[in-house]
Amino acid sequence: MLPILDNSINLQFNIMLQSKFVKLSFLCLLLLSSIFSFAHPGGHYHQGDGIVLNTWQLKTGELIRGNFSMGKDGFMMLEQEEGKMVKVAVADLTLQDQLLANFNIKKFKQLNESFLSSTNGSASQKKDWNYFYLFLTIILLFSTIFILDKGVSLFKKSIYIKTKFSTIACTILLMSFSLYACKKSSDNITTTTTIPKTTTTFIDSAFTPYKPSVATRWDDTYFYVASNGIPAHNMMVGITNWQQQVPIPQFYTGTNSWSIPLQPVYATTPLSTKTNFMKGAVAIAVNGIPIFNALNNRGEDSYLIGELDNWGGHCGKADDYHYHAAPLHLSATSALKPIAFALDGFAVYGTTEPDGSAMQSLDTCHGHIFNNGVYHYHGTTNYPYVVGAMKGKVTTDPLTPAPENQILPQAFSSPLRPATSPLAGASITDYASTGVNAYKLTYKVGANFGYIDYNWNTTNKYTFVYTSPAGVITTSTYQR
């Protein structure tokens, strides 16, 4: 009876072994495909999936919705809902959108060139390693079969344990290689958090106390803020490091209004204001005055070197008034509402939280997520004052490389007179209105005073009368 039992066991095992061989061979094929194939990240821009499509405006006024996919030779491809692609000529876009399109095309080209250079140097090495892992796996699998075959006559009682062990081992190997394949395909996929679209009612309520000095409007993509760049508060007094500019009105209106994105998107890597945005604004205050980087275009802290007045502002080379420090004085009017909005779409509050509680600890961007789940910045009296890094995604002007790059879209100032140079030892002691569209700035060098009297008429003719500390008077006129 024993030989019959042995033959029965042998027969049963051989059948089971053949079945296992087939299964193991199939596992090898699966492993092969897992090594050399990439998991697909899924479809794109399906209706109702929460993806925000950019809006592009043609010179004709027509709007086209779609996200940049690729571009070359003056054209770009936009991907719309359900994967529909549309080709658009860059020259047909408005000037602002042409800048954005050309930036994307340039970045697309750089990414391709970077990918090709890196692939040529490392693809063969990665492929060699993949072959090595495949060879090692196959050896391990067939070694298992060999051991099982040899173990029949010696360890018949433990054959089922061995078989189950081999199955578990193969399953673990398969899972490991599958995870490896998925990892390869998802290394460059960024997981994003969907941020609720900011309501225009909320943003408009922050600007309302400063109307009619500011005007607001909006579309599906941006909230627009128009102003003349002149605040209701006094200016210039307190500056001890003066570059001889004075405030004049700016045309931040129409297509040159300030643009706040209604749908903020977290940046994969926030751009630091220590190495970026030393040109142009990073935020717009709720009184219509732009807020620039805490660092000037030479990388110096404008506040610490005495360039700012008692309200945290000064004038640029276009005689455009703007802040470099947080305009915390606006909290007296704004109360618990934001005092500004960054150009990535996130609100800027004063030194308290939106509910009036004490300000919580800030991250490197100079903000945090509040208990409503929405991110915001804070203005403080210490560096970086407003924005340490742009938490949200922004587009930078391709014509201005870092660190003197700037965010687009952005309103631009209008120069009137040639840029002036710093006046050593000068400090501004007074600035006052002397009539309709007329101002007088008083400064002091040593024990002597100097003055700039200027005004403009309804035809935008500007007259400047300069009185130097030595008493020399000169007059200049400029027409806008």
Image (cartoon, rainbow, N blue to C red):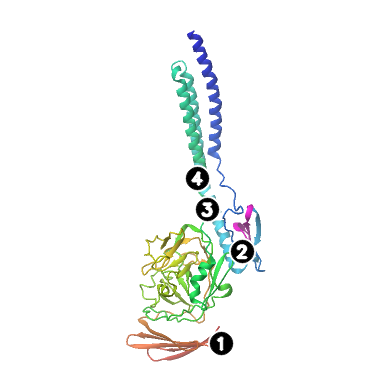
Q: Which of 24 and 416 is in front in this view?
A: 24
Gap between marks 3 and 2, in whole Å? 28 Å
Going from N to C along the chain, the mark reached first, 3 or 2, is 2
Gap between marks 3 and 4, in whole Å? 12 Å
Viewer-nearest of discs 1 and 3: 1
Q: Is residue 205 visible?
A: yes
Q: Which of 65 and 181 is in front in this view?
A: 65
Q: Name the residue under label 2.
A: 56
Label annotation for residue 114: 3
Going from N to C along the chain, the mark reached first, 3 or 4, is 3
Q: Assess disc 2: are there few (<14), some (14-19) or many (≥20) residues with their C-alpha within 10 Å of its C-alpha.
A: many
Going from N to C along the chain, the mark reached first, 1 or 3, is 3
Report the quarter where the C terminus lies: bottom right
Amino acid type of the residue that numbered disc 1 sits on in the rendered structure: Thr
Q: Is residue 95 left or right of residue 351?
A: right
Q: Name the residue under label 4.
A: 122
Gap between marks 2 and 1, in whole Å? 36 Å
Q: In terms of secondary structure, where does tag 1 sit? A: loop
Q: Which corner quadrant of the image does residue 472 belong to? A: bottom left
